[in-house]
Amino acid sequence: MSTPQRMTPSEALVETLAAHGVTEVFGIVGSAYMDALDIFPAAGIRFIPVAHEQGAAHMADGYARASGRHGVCIAQNGPGVTNFVTAIAAAYWAHSPVVFITPETGSMTMGLGGFQETEQLPIFAKITRYQGHVSSPKRMAEIAARCFDRALLELGPCQLNIPRDHFYGDIQATISPPLRIGRGAGEEAALDEAAALLAAAKFPVIVAGGGVIMAGGGAEAVALAERLHAPVCTSYLHNDAFPASHPLWCGPLGYQGSKAAMQLIAQADVVLALGTRLGPFGTLPQYGIEYWPAGAKIIQVDAEARVLGLVKPVSVGLCGDARAVAAALLQRLAGRELACAANLSGRSARIAGEKAAWEQELAGWTHERDPFSLEAAKDSPHMHPRQMLRELEQAMPKHAMVSTDIGNICSVANSYLRFDEPRSMFAAMSFGNCGYAFPVICGAKVARPDRPAIAYVGDGAWGISLNELLTCAREKIGVTVVLFNNGQWGAEKKNHVDFYSRRFQGVNLANPSWAAVARAFGCEGVTVDRLTDVGPALQAAVRAQAEGTCTVLEMMVTQELGDPFRRDALSKPVRYLEKYRDYT
Ligand SMILES: Cc1ncc(C[n+]2csc(CCOP(=O)(O)OP(=O)(O)O)c2C)c(N)n1
Ligand SMILES: [Mg+2]
């Protein structure tokens, strides 16, 4: 619609949603935006009512991550909107193009302390890419469109803040088509320099990050890796950035990642960090291995200029689209003599050797062996978490999407989550909030009903998020929850074990039967206590997804605990006061 037309601001909003291809919106109904909600069906938009607004924003995040399209959520002004905060912060660190619509208290009463009033822009200022405020009803279409354009342009959440009286009126509005701006491959001179470094490299290693996925650059990354015959590590929690079945794939870096990836990158003289900010948490030493090659030349590619050279010093920083950069580098390397060609067979053997060694170690690593874990598992009738995770890996259906929460077992799962296609792994990323995985997989399933959808969740995190079982039952969202019942907030208990002489506080959980709880919500619930039942239970639950059935598989596991999250951030307690003397 290129010419202005008479409409109401509600119509302008809904027409803008439609123009941007929005077909689903997550939220909880509220009077503030009811005038727009009323016409969603006529615009082909399904409103998906949820149990908690945090769930709605996580679902929008999952929807965006699975599809690459906008995820959209909406809430009542005041408390509905503040319930978004945690999930928007998570979406910010996951680079998700989420547009969250926040009706605000009326413009004529703002500041008087009326009902459901709070300043809604400052709360989100640091966790959004753009905040659009509809300062006049006449600007509804313009500001709404800007939120949608910028969410994709800058890859992050954008807030559309609308005083609730601004939904009403008689305006002339133009509905503009989406503005799509390509990023390109970046600076020519930097590309030349990067190509020269790669051509001279004797042991080049690629780190493939989330930027490869977001740019749709999987094929280019594979082609570049093959041209260099370079091993490819995936960046922390982006296990789907490179196909795991490819011979050059080495697995994830970072916490509970692949030792093969770490041993190989430690050898690198040149690292191509493709589409990754090289987040600090994903480059810390693990398993006692200081793998980051401090002496290597680093070429870092990211769509966001400000992350280049931020965490690790770089030799070349390239601000561009990971796909376009990979293609441009391939072009520059075509027909060129590569120093690394000289030791191709040696490198091949090295890659295969490190991968085989890690596989063998993983295969034998059936349980944790530290004193606490050995004690905890000794007389337990339950499954060892690692063995259970391996069974899940082996039974994982093709094209599966898996979300993971924050917790000890979810973290250990990192070694057992391998994917052949992008947009398959949705971890809680660096915001790290417990309660992420379940609503996120619900949103992913709504976006991609054709793909199996599985959430890995600890029993503690489950308590934060299980209310969305209501949404699954009501809206027939067929996802599978693999719930790790170890009766504890395990990841934090591990810190008590390692640093606080096992003075446990607030870490033991008395659980109901989570399978029975799921059934009470109108979903399916199955308790699994034997390794041989893990795979068949997963497969049956995935089959039931086709009927819109959500199943909770309650995995009964021992209380053993893998390596801690934050060894880097904790130290043994020091007490100076007499009354706390024993607390060391
Ligand atoms: C919202 C939120 N609250 C608290 C934490 C701190 N925290 C990190 S891991 C963890 C324990 C997770 O326990 P559970 O979900 O049972 O998984 P497990 O570690 O037992 O596998 C907690 C409480 C967090 N990350 N997010
Ligand atoms: Mg637990």
Image: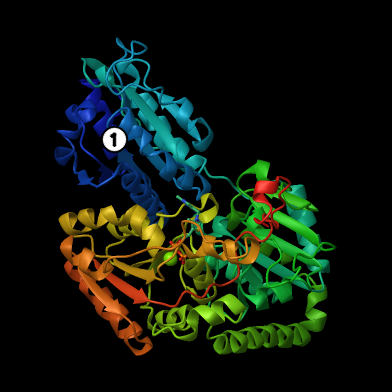
When the figure is inspected, residue 251 is found, relative to residue 277, above or below; the finding is below
Picture coordinates of residue 245, whole percent (x, y): 52, 80
Q: What residue did someone put label 1 on?
A: 75
How is the structure coloured here? rainbow
- Evaluate whether residue 179 shows in this view: no
Q: Is residue 408 left or right of residue 481?
A: right
Query: What is the quadrant of the N terminus in the image?
Result: top left
Q: Is residue 494 left or right of residue 468?
A: right
Picture coordinates of residue 431, whole percent (x, y): 52, 49
Q: Amino acid at mark 1?
A: Ala
Instruction: Specify whether tag 1 is near ligand 1 (CB below 8 Å).
Output: no
Q: Secondary structure at mark 1?
A: loop
When the figure is inspected, residue 353 is found, relative to residue 467, above or below; the finding is below
User: Dot 1: within a 10 Å radius of its alpha carbon, few (fewer than 14), some, or many (20 or more) residues?
Assistant: many
Picture coordinates of residue 120, whole percent (x, y): 40, 26
- For the point 30% across and 73% down, the residue is 553
